[in-house]
Image: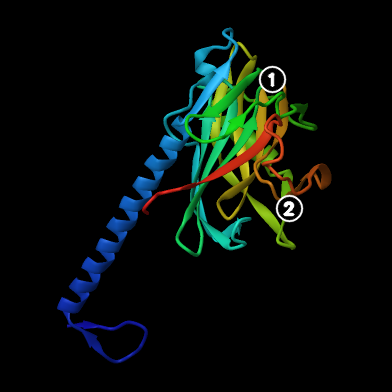
Amino acid sequence: MVKLLGGRKGYISPLVLTLLGLSVSSVLAQDEGQAKQRLEFMRAAVESLEPESAASTPKAALTFASKPLLRYSDPTRGGIDAASENITVLLDASVWRLGMEGRPTALVTVEIYQAPDESRVLAFEFLSLSEAKFALQHKTENIRWDPTDSAVIMKEMPSASKPADSATARLVQMRKLAQRFSVNERLKNEAIECRLLTQPIDRYKSAKEKIADGAIFTFANGTNPEIGLVFESDGERWRYGILRLTAAEVSVTLDGRQIAAYDRFNAHSRTDWPYHGASHRIRQEK
């Protein structure tokens, strides 16, 4: 017999414990299966976006990576379904990289929301990181994005030491630089301080773009990324850029001084802006 924990007097038979263990294992296996199904669904959603550009744009710059840079969920957060005015819950989400070399051409976020009536919505967020002219057209839905500019403006990082010689040492440097920033978000009239995820979601370099080392960090509400922070080195100095990854009101400070502020944004309003959003209802079982 196995004694109960917590100071209570009583016993649970090995049979009951075995049944409980099997039940938990079954639930975990089911959850894992559903998570895998949702990932494949999001991958297919990304593959449904067809890139268009001038013939001079390299194919690699308009190819999606096969795996997401980041995957997250946020069961405490959702949005308002404009049609039904019901609160929706964010079930699963992922951030994908467009472009196989150097700085990403764009970042695309895919989010799966569930409404109280069990219906589901697939939402896209698009962010251009390139001045190259391109577009993304959905194969079946009325969704198109034609960014006319890049959302990121790179600036010299003040009071930064010279980039180190090794990749490992440069990562340490970038983490310390990232700690000089802070991000605050206002959501549903609530002020939220976002936390820095110390592991960058992307690391890259490009001789063509004169990037000896580059990385994208994120500030998150829970695990939900709201602001991206780009660091790039040419081997002699550090530069940084801010990426808006949310339609919510958000502000960014560096060494206690505000350097960026974004009002609440209607991401559906313009299809040619560097930051854009779109959504459609879906049929997805789990």
Q: Position of residue 185 (x, y in %)?
A: 72, 53
Residue 184 image label: 2
Q: Is residue 48 left or right of residue 198?
A: left
Residue 254 visible? The answer is no
Mark 2 and mark 1: Cα distance apart in space: 28 Å
Q: Position of residue 158 (x, y in %)?
A: 80, 32
Q: Is residue 249 left or right of residue 82?
A: right
Compared to residue 168, the image places residue 9 above or below, namely below
Lower position in the chain sequence, tag 2 or tag 1: 1
Q: Residue at x 29, y 92 (%)?
A: 9
Crowd rating for badge 2 (residues with CA inside 10 Å; few <14, some 14–19, many 20+): many
Q: Is residue 103 left or right of residue 184?
A: left
Q: Position of residue 219 (x, y in %)?
A: 64, 46
Q: Residue at x 37, y 40 (%)?
A: 40
Residue at the farthest bottom position: 9
Residue 273 visible? The answer is yes
Q: Image quarter for residue 218? A: top right
Which quarter shows the N terminus? bottom left
Mark 1: which amino acid?
Answer: Glu
Residue carrying label 1: 131
Residue 18 image label: none
Q: Residue at x 73, y 48 (%)?
A: 182
42 or 3, which lies in front?
Answer: 42
Compared to residue 74, the image places residue 147 above or below, namely above
Secondary structure type for disc 1:
loop
Mark 2: which amino acid?
Answer: Asn
Q: Image quarter for residue 275? A: top right
Crowd rating for badge 1 (residues with CA inside 10 Å; few <14, some 14–19, many 20+): some
Q: How many marks?
A: 2
Q: Position of residue 190 (x, y in %)?
A: 72, 63
